[in-house]
Amino acid sequence: MLIGRTAGASTLAGLVAAALLTPGAPAVADPAPDGGDQVSAEQKIIDGYVNKQHNCIPDLPPNPQSVTWDPPGFAPYVGGSGVVHDANPQLGGVYRADYVNGRWHIEYPYC
């Protein structure tokens, strides 16, 4: 029976090696880049804000109402800074959004 187990393991190892070495085999692709537009930036800002607030102040659920941009405003594929406004006046806060290598990087300098 030892030969059967060894042969099975060798076959499995050979199949795994073949799959890894086969040119044109499907690979795990990088996710698509974020859109560099204002809508995608504001969605990332709100998503990050909700996550940040849940981690900072778990007893006060966030309820973001709007995102405003400091002058000169939003710049496509660049970003900007501004304020997230929450229905709860105790919440909300400033953010900085930068578009780097196809991704929005949002900084919330509080908590």
Image: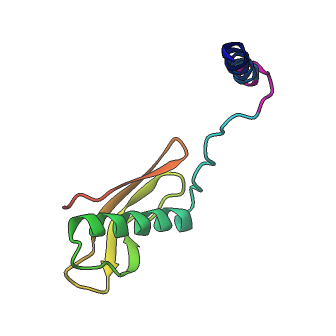
What percent of the width, then of the height, locates residue 78?
Answer: 48, 51
23 magenta-colored: yes
Q: Going by the image, does 61 lie left or right of 46?
A: left
2 magenta-colored: no
Q: Please determine whether, in this image, residue 42 is positioned above or below residue 12.
A: below
Residue at 53% across, 52% down:
77
Q: Nearer the viewer, residue 72 or 106?
A: 106
Q: Which residues are magenta?
A: 19-25
Q: Please determine whether, in this image, residue 101 is positioned above or below residue 67.
A: above
Residue at 34% across, 73% down:
84
The residue at the far front in this view is: 1
What percent of the width, then of the height, locates residue 100?
Answer: 47, 44
Residue at 31% across, 86% down:
87
Asked if residue 70 shows in the view, the reply is no
What percent of the width, then of the height, locates residue 48?
Answer: 38, 63
Q: Please determine whether, in this image, residue 67 is positioned above or below residue 6.
A: below
Residue 4 picture quarter: top right
